[in-house]
Each structure stands twice: as C-alpha cells, then as structure tokens.
Image (cartoon, grey):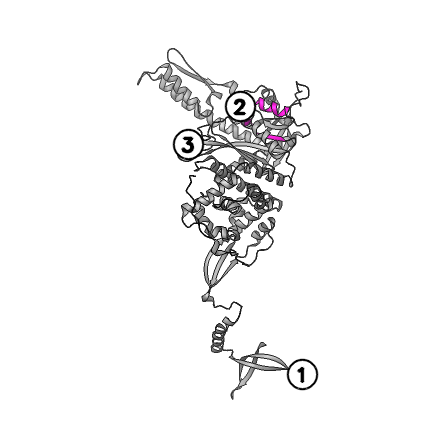
Amino acid sequence: MYPKLVSVKSGRAKRQLVYLRLMERVKVDGVWKERVVANLGRQDVEGRQALGDLLIKLRRFSDEVLVRPEEIESREALEYGNVLVGQKLWEEIGLQRILPEICGERAAVSLGESGVLAMVLNRLSAARSKLALYDWMPTAYLPAWRSADFTKLPTDPIDWVEWYYRTMDWLIAGKNKEEIEARIAAWAQTLFPVEVVFYDITNVQFEGWQELKQARFGHVKVGRRNHKQILLGLVMAERLPVACHLFRGNRAEKTTLLWVHQKLKKQFNVGRIITVADRGQISEATLNQIEVDGDGYIVALKRRRCTEVEPLLDQDASTFVPLVWNRSKILTLSAWEGPVEKASVAGRPDKRRIVVFNPVKAQEDRDKRTEAIAELEADLQELQERVQDKKGRPKTIRTITMAAEKILSHRNGKRYFRYGVEKDRSFTFEPNEEGRRLEEKLDGKWVIRTIEKDLSFKDVVFKYKDLLDVEDGFRHLKDFIKVAPVYHWKYRRVKAHIFICVLALLLERLLDRKLTEAKIDLSARKALEKLKTIKVVSNRVGSLELKYVTPPSEELNRILAACGIHKLPKILSEPFPKNPTAAKRRTPKKSSR
C-alpha cells in the first residue's frame, strides 16, 4: 500500500480539490490496477489536522517513533567532545588494558580503570578535588559512566568520594605505578627511540596542617614559604612525561638526579641513555658517576664562580654560529664550541663545552641590570644622607651595616656596588666594576657541557633547549591540571594524586603532538575547551529516551580527525546493566584522605 494525492473538480465552479487516498496495486485478469483502500480526506487545513489526529491514534500500533514537537522533553545537555577525545587518547596508549593487567582485580569498593579514567578526564576538563567529582561527573557523558559499576555509587557525597579514594589505593598499591610507567615508556618507544630523557624538579605544596613525614619545609620555587612541601621530579621523552618521582620537601635537588638516572635504566630496561638537566640538579660527583656507568649527559654549568666557564665568556659573540630554535616559539640563537677537554682518566670520554648566546635575553638582562642599578643607587644614596644627618637618633656601625646589607640583599646588589663603614660612622659606597664587567659578559649567555661526541653542537643546544618542555609541563601541572595544593593526608594518596595528574599531562601532551602533526594551530588546552561545545542532548518522549550528539563544526571535525575520530554518530545507544537488580549500593567504611 502507498499514499497518493488525487485532484478532483467539484461543484459548478469546477473548483480543484486535492484528496489523500491510500492505494494498493492488485492484479485483475492479468493486468495490474490501482484500487482505493481508504480515503483519508482533503488536503486543506482541516483535513491535514484530522489526518494528524489519526496518525497519533495509529502510532501505538507501530514500532516507529511518531511524536508531536510539544511531546519532546529535553532533559539535559552533557559535555561529550572533550571526554570522548580524552578516552580515545587513553585507549591509544593502551591504559584501559594496562591498568587491569598490572593492578589486578579491583577491590569491592572501588571503580577500577573506569574510575581512574574519570579522575584523569576531570583533571583535563575541570580540575577539581575528588569530592567535587560528585558535581562534575553528571555534567559529562561517557557510556562507561552509565554502566552498573557507576549506578551502584552511594548518593551521599562523603560516601561517594570514598569509592574514588579506594580506587586511588588500587592504582598505587605495591609497585603498580612503576610497572605502569614502564609500560608507558614501552609504548613511547613505538613512536620514537627513548634515548634522550629530560629531567627537572619542582615543589608541590600542601594545604593545612600536614603530619606526613615526607612533607617538609624547604626551598620554595613556587608558592608560599609557610607551607610544607614535597619535591616532584618529572622525566620526559620527546615532550611526553614517562615517569615521576617524589622526594621529601627539604632534600637537595642535586642529590636526586643520579638516583632517578639509575632507576630509569632499571625500570625501563634500556641501555645507554642521555640525561638532560639544568644547572640546579647537577654535581660533579653525579656527572662522574654517569660517565662511569657509560651513559651520557647534556647539562648547563653554573655561570658564576665556575673556573671552567670564565675563560669561555671572553669569546667575541660575532664569531658565534647562528641557530634557529623552533619549538613552542621561535628563538634566534648563536653558539660557539670551545676547545675539547681531554679526559684525565683512561677510558673516560672527553668533555665538550658550548657557549650559547640569545640576543633577546641579552637585551632583557641589560634592561634589568640598568633598572636594578638605578634603584639600588637611590636607596644607598638615601642611606648615606640619613647617616650624614646629625639630627635624629644616634647611629652605630652595626645599624648602618645592617641597613646597607638589607639594601644590597635585593636584586643581587653586591654584584653592582661595594660599601664601607668607617670608625667615625661615615658611610660610603662605590660601583663594583669587576662584578659589572662579569655581568656584562654573561648577558644572554649560558654554557653547556656534554660528553656526546656524535652530536653536533647544534643538536646539543637544541636538546638542552627542549628542557623547556619539562618546565612548561610543570606550569601545566600547576595552572591547568592543578596538582597543588594537595589536601590528602596519607602518602599513598598523595602519590596516587600526583600520578593521576601526570597521566592527565600525558594525555594533554599527546593531544598537542597530534594537533602539531595535523598542522592545527591550537594548543591542547584550547582544543579541549572548543571540544566542550560538542554535547550529548538527552530527549525523552514518553518512556523512550534518545541521546543526540550535536553536530561539530569544521574546525572541531579536524581536531577529532587528528585524534582518529572521523565521524560522530547522530544518536547514541545507551548501555544498560546486565542485571540491574544486582547493583546494590554499599557504603564503605570511612577512611582519611
């Protein structure tokens, strides 16, 4: 059967009317003919309305969805694009398989791999505390979060967050973290050879009273001085974080490099590796041991009070070879390699030293020095006038010295000025010409030492500059992923929290890599923000619920394609638990954070 419009002339005026009829084809005496099954009325306003009422009555006899617009109820619009891409990257690394294999069967009151993924995606999308996951997860959509494991979560937020704390314990138990990092490094080796690793260290502060023995007061790089902290060492290869290590808050940074270097070789089961580190993480004993182990290094040397650096600074910058470093930004550099220092011990490698000059940084150094000299000179002049003023309080040699020391303690004042206090309590100051000449030589320069004879000095310079990726990773951990401040009270929870943040950084850096390969001029952070506009809209029609995906723009389609997602479905099918009645809610025993 099929519908058909039929025109009929009616009345004396021969007015043209259009009728809708339900027809069928039948065979009569061997000839196919049309037969009217039903007349469904005229196709005017009243007829079409009557036909609509008839269809509404007939829809209960059909499996097709026939609804009026006013019967569609939009229930919610959930974030989908950003969490979908995060899950895709997670699966590309293989973490959905690696975590269950290493961590084993999950505890009764935990969420396993899906719970870890939820915490990682939360750090990428809207970094909040574990308790705030209770408010964030209902605003995002992933099919796994509608499964039976998540439907049995308690309704009380305090009991609810316990499931995530137990999931963190499941993730970090025993040597799970080290084995997961080894598997991540093995995956990274399928993309590039892990021969050069970059290492840097920063501090992560705690909030509130902290009795954790690893939390100590120490040198503060970022944050406030009255907060306890731990040190976080981050290891990266080709801009991807492959390992992280925690140290007590007051440990000397230079004592961590050798320990991390030796642990990496054992953990990743690799041969010779080259470690790239900044001047704050090195010591001669560490570098000597790396040489003895047969490995390599690329490090920056201290610029001041270093006998091997001072002779190299006299080289004329006009003789340097120009270089262009193009990573996150373009830098025009120049470099000059000094004479090779022959090894004093047989079997040990020769040492190469390369002086690098950055003209932009040199101008910044000059401007800062000029500003500092003017400010310090004004303060010292004011102190001299106060000392010469006979009125007011009596002045002693000790109080004058303390005032001068306080002034010169700011902006490295002793590099630019000297002062003297005589027995008659007169105060004088003069320029430190030797210190100023040294600062002028150091403008925009730094010195790199390496024992890699097979790398050109251009490659050595670029490898060291790539260490900025680690510093950039720290900024993303603290600003975007919000690794600090830490509110947990137990070391295993602190360790799990930081590991989850590093996994989020891994996904972000992998997304950055894919955007760069696809020649999309967007950072991962901006791409994730744009992907939030792809929503899953839940519409309810009677007892039927349909989930529609909002169509992405052309730019979003390019981002999705870069991640291997070439087409989004228009309608999503909702998974249901195999045995809903078996999903009973259990309330875990309370535990501290």
State the residue at coordinates (42%, 22%): 407
Q: Secondary structure at mark 1?
A: strand
Amino acid on which disc 1 is placed: Val
**Mark 3 or mark 1, which is nearer to you?**
3
Query: Residue 267 lies in what quarter of the image?
Result: top right
How far from the left and from the top, in percent, is residue 24? Answer: 60, 79
- Mark 1 lies on residue: 31
- Left or right: 379 as drawn, with respect to 254: left
Does the magenta portion include 289? Answer: yes
State the residue at coordinates (40%, 35%): 208
Q: Secondary structure at mark 3?
A: loop
Instruction: Let me know if residue 220 appears in the view.
Output: yes
How far from the left and from the top, in percent, is residue 44? Answer: 49, 78
Mark 2 to mark 3 CA distance (whole Å):
44 Å
Q: Residues within 10 Å of mark 2 (few under 14, many from 20)?
A: some
Quick one: label 3 or label 1, which is nearer the N terminus? 1
Point out which mark residue 211 bears: 3
- Mark 2 lies on residue: 439
Does the magenta portion include 181? Answer: no
Number of marks in the rendered image? 3
How far from the left and from the top, in percent, is residue 151? Answer: 47, 52
The region drawn magenta spans: 272-292
Q: Is residue 406 above or below residue 211?
A: above
**Mark 1 or mark 2, which is nearer to you?**
1
Amino acid on which disc 2 is placed: Glu
Quick one: label 2 or label 3, which is nearer the N terminus? 3
